[in-house]
Amino acid sequence: MVNTTPSGAAASAKALPPLTPGPHRKRLGLISVIASFGGLLFGYDTGVINGALRPMAAELGLEAFTEGVVTSSLVFAAAFGAIICGRLSDAIGRRTTIISLAILFFVGTLFVTLTPNFELLVVGRVLLGLAVGGASTVVPVFLAELAPFEIRGSLSGRNEVAIVIGQLSAFVINAIIGNVFGHIDGVWRIMFAICAIPAICLFFGMLRMPESPRWLIEKGRNDDALAVLKTVRSEDRAIAELEEITKVAKEEQTEQQIGLKAVLTNKWLIRILLVGIGLGVAQQLTGINSIMYYGQTVLVESGFEEGAALIANIAPGVIAVIGGLIALAYMDRFDRRKTFIIGYSLTTVCHLLIGISSMVLEPGNPLRPWIILFLVVLFVGSMQTFLNVATWVYLSEVFPLHMRGLGTGVSIFFLWIANGFLSLYFPTLVEATGITGTFFLFAGVGVLALIFIITSVPETRGRTLEALEEDVTTGAIYTAHKKKK
C-alpha cells in the first residue's frame, strides 16, 4: 500500500522562507527572458514556413508531397533533437546545451537561406529541427529548475509565450515581406534569414547566464549551486533550498536511482513517463501546429484570396500571444488538470464547429471564409490559453531530477513525431477529405484526449520539484489524486 502521509520534501517546502522582492527577483526575470529566446527561435522557425512555403515551392518546383517533406523534415528532426539534447543536458549542463543550440540555429539558418536546391534545403531544415527540438526540451527544464515552486508555472511558461510570439513575428514579417516584396525572386529567403538575429541574441545572452542549480547539485558542485541560488533568491531561502535539493540528490545516489535503469525498474516512473508521452501526443493531435504551419493553405481552402489569406493568417498568431499571456496570469492559481480538461473541451467543440461550418457553407458563400477564420482564431485562443502553456510547464516539472532530461526528452520526442506525421500528411489529408473531414477527425481525437486526462493525469501545481519527485517515485501522487477526487 502506498504511503500517503506528507513527504519530507513536502514538509520542508512549507518550512521554506517566503519569496521576497529584491534584485534576485529581477535577476530571475532577466534569466527567463534570455533563455526564452530559445522559445522565440522555436516559434519563428516553425511559423515562418507558413508564408514562405508558397513562393519557395514556386522557385524550387515543389509538389504537395515535397512541400510536406520540407515542412515535416524540421519536425521529425526536432523529435530527435529533443531526446538527444535532453540526455546531453543531463551530461554537460542546461546552460552549455542552450549555447550550443544557438550555434545550431544560426548554421541551420545559413543553409536554408543560401540553399540552391531542394536537397540542401532539407538539410538546413533538419539542422533547424534539431535545434528546435533541443530548445523545446532544455529551455523549459532550465527555467523550471531555476524557478521557486510558488511561481514555477508562470516563469517556465514564459518560454511557451515566447514560442507564440516567435510564430506571430513570423506571420507578421511574412505578410509584410510577401505583400511588399513579393515580386522579388527568392523573397522567402529573406523571411528565413531574419531567424539569425534571435540566434545571435541567445548565444551572447546565455554566455552571461548561470547554470541550473539543481544540475550543479546532482554533479556534486554544491558551492557553485549555492552561489547561483543566492543570485535568484534571498540568502536564507537559497540556503534552505540548497539543503532540500541536496537531501533528495543524496537519496537518489544512495538508492542508485540514476538514469534509464532506474526508470525501467520502477513501475511508477514508467507510468509517469507514459503520462508525459500521452500529454505530448494529445497536444499535437489537436492539429494546432497544422494551423501554424499551413494556416494560409486552410484559409485559401476556405475561400480567401492568397494575399488576403497571408494577412488574415496574422489573426491566429495575435490570439495565440493573448492566450499565452492570459495563461501566464492564472498558471499558478489553477490546477493543471482543470486547465487541461477545460482546454480539450473547448478545442473539441471548435473542431466540430469548423467541420460543420465548412460542410453547411458551400464554397463561394461569402460568409464561409470569415466564419471559418473566426472559428480557427477561437480554436487557437482556446489552445493557447488552456493547453499549450500548461503542457510545456507540466512536462518540465513532473519528472524526478535524475530522469528530468531523459523523461522530458522522450515525451517531447513523441510530441514531435506526432507533429511530424501531421505536418507531412496534412496537405494530403485536406486534399482528400477537405476541411470538413480533417476537423471532424481532430474532434474525435479530442474526445479521447479528455478521457486520458480525466483518468490518468495527476496534479503537480503548488509543490516543490523535490516534493513531486518523492510522490512520483513512490506512486503517492496517484493516490493523492484519487483521494482529492
Image: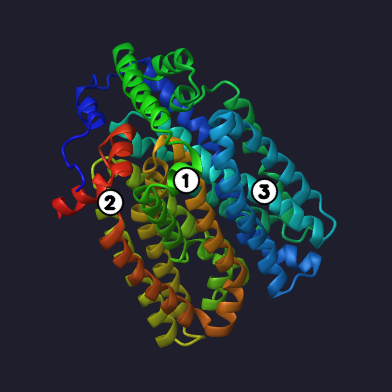
Q: Is residue 234 above or below residue 59?
A: above
The nearer-to-camera label among 3 and 1 is 1
Q: Check disc 2 and give the amino acid type.
A: Pro
Q: Check disc 3 and give the amino acid type.
A: Leu
Could you classify mark 3 by the number of other residues whose Cα lies within 10 Å: few (under 14), some (14-19), or many (20 or more)? many
The numbered mark, 1 or 2, whose residue comes first in the sequence reads: 1
Instruction: Say left or right for 297 vs 121.
Output: left
Could you classify mark 1 by the number of other residues whose Cα lies within 10 Å: few (under 14), some (14-19), or many (20 or more)? many
Q: Is residue 367 above or below residue 45?
A: below
Q: Check disc 1 and give the amino acid type.
A: Thr
Residue 442 in view of the camera: yes
The quadrant where residue 229 appears:
top left
Q: Is residue 320 above or below residue 401?
A: below
Mark 1, secondary structure of its residue: helix
* Separation of residues labelled 1 and 2 (CA atoms): 16 Å
Residue that carries the numbered disc 1 in the rendered image: 408
Q: Residue at x 30, y 19 (%)?
A: 21
Residue that carries the numbered disc 2 in the rendered image: 458
Residue 311 in view of the camera: no
Position in image of residue 281 (x %, y %) = 45, 61
Q: Residue at x 56, y 60 (%)?
A: 417
The numbered mark, 3 or 2, whose residue comes first in the sequence reads: 3
| Circles 1 and 2 in contact, beta carbons < 8 Å | no
* Separation of residues labelled 3 and 2 (CA atoms): 34 Å
| Circles 3 and 2 in contact, beta carbons < 8 Å | no
